[in-house]
Amino acid sequence: MTVQSKNDVTTIKQTEVTIPDLTIKDLLSAIPAHCFKRSAIRSSLYIAWDCLVIGGIYKTATFLDGFITPGAINLPHSVLYPVARFSLWSLYGFWTGLFATGLWVVAHECGHQAFSESKFINNSVGWVLHSALGVPYHSWRITHAKHHASTGHMTQDQVFVPKTRSQLGLSEFDAAQENILGSSVSDKVKKELWDALGDSPIGATLGAAGYLLGGWPAYLIRNASGQKRYPAGTNHFNPSAVMFAPHQYGSIIISDIGILLWLAGVAGSIYNFGFWNVFRLYLVPYLWVNHWLVLITFLQHTDPLLPHYRAPEFTFPRGALATLDRNLLGDCGKIMGWIGAHATHGISETHVVHHISSKIPHYNAWEASDTLRQRLKQAGIVLQGAPGGWREVYRVFKECKFVEDEGNIVFYKNALGLAASRPKIADDAASDSGVEVDKL
């Protein structure tokens, strides 16, 4: 983003983002037919593998913990023994949480009916896995399906919906002081916006960290970052909530039963084994799972390069392509990038194709993504974001503050009122609602 300042006005050179004019048939036809095949046996093997790895991490940590004693190793100071033990179990929490996110991903595929050909198997496995991870399976499955149907839609999407200028209580847009697309803004407006939205590095870090740790339960409990038109008190546990249809009432109750059983299991474990044992072995990895879930999905759907649409310009293909693929932990090097992708079954690396067809199982999504990218490249569309990690969350958190109340295709503006991107619509993609322009 090239910045120029002149006469108390800042002007930037924006990236032009191609607005897709592809049909769903165009996109699906690019994917080999065998990529849509689902296998309960093959999908189950990934559950077994994830559990095996998590068990191995636990056994390794327990084995090493036995050596952290004065009789086994001689450390310079006695305080280093609890420090070493804390470090060991912190690593256990990190790695267990990362691979438990893989189990979360498999349960998520059950909700999309991508686990097997059987709806009963899908919902049964998904309910067990998601309940064990504190997720109301059916409740989230239903709203997540709505998210897929309306990704990037300002009034229909269910999560990561940008706040508008008016929703944040900012001063009204002034065409004499700023450009609606965010390519120029006066110093006066910049100061006003910065005073209202600006973050110090520490503030941005704390804000992003709080979002990663508390964002997921806040979304389930009080619709944080969800659809703004829903009434206050909307949550995923009330079967009468506005986002659920009357015929889904029973499914929400079943989800709530799963959560009650989960809470009872956690409470019973604390009673029998003590809080610190449960905290160390389960709750810390659970918090890491929540962290990875928010980090992955936030970066998939939030970036200065991604458009958001209002009804007149929204189509399903446009929404599905308002997402990014990213290599999870790729900013930590190739090995960590491979581990991140392997542990989470490529949910971050193959996200775009997942939005084109959510029934493609993760083990086929790699090939499907490769072929889809070739088709998108022909249309001038590249949806590969920077590697997913904490540094990228910090950058996006600072750059994506609000969108304008006006416009049918909008991009995020930062705390200075500048937008890094603007829409580029191909000449042959113009829509006239059925009027044949060339005959006028």
Image (spheres, rainbow, N blue to C red):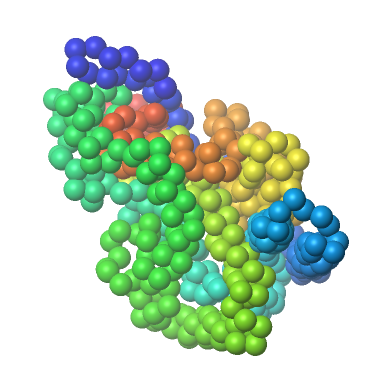
Q: Judge left or right: residue 111 versus residue 234.
A: right
Q: Say if 237 sits above or below 104 in the image.
A: below
Q: Is residue 160 visible?
A: yes
Whole-percent x, y for residue 377 in the image: 60, 30
Q: Judge left or right: residue 191 versus residue 287.
A: left
In this view, which residue lies farthest toward the right?
72
Q: Judge left or right: residue 151 versus residue 8.
A: right
Question: Which quadrant, please, contains the N terminus?
Answer: top left
Q: Judge left or right: residue 319 versus residue 135.
A: left
Q: Say if 391 sits above or below 280 in the image.
A: above
Whole-percent x, y for residue 123 in the image: 63, 76
In this view, which residue lies farthest toward the front?
77
What residue sits 34% from the left and 39% below the top? Answer: 199
Question: Which is more toward the observer, 142 or 106?
Answer: 106
Specify the quadrant of the image occupied by residue 383.
top right
Question: Which quadrant, please, contains the C terminus?
Answer: top left
Whole-percent x, y for residue 208 in the image: 44, 48
Specify the quadrant of the image occupied by residue 106.
bottom right
Q: Is residue 35 visible?
A: no
Whole-percent x, y for residue 282 in the image: 64, 71
What residue sits 37% from the left and 44% below the top? Answer: 203
- Number of on-image labels: 0
What residue sits 58% from the left and 42% below the top? Answer: 388
What residue sits 44% from the left and 44% below the top? Answer: 205
Specify the quadrant of the image occupied by residue 276.
bottom right
Q: Say if 237 sits above or below 390 in the image.
A: below
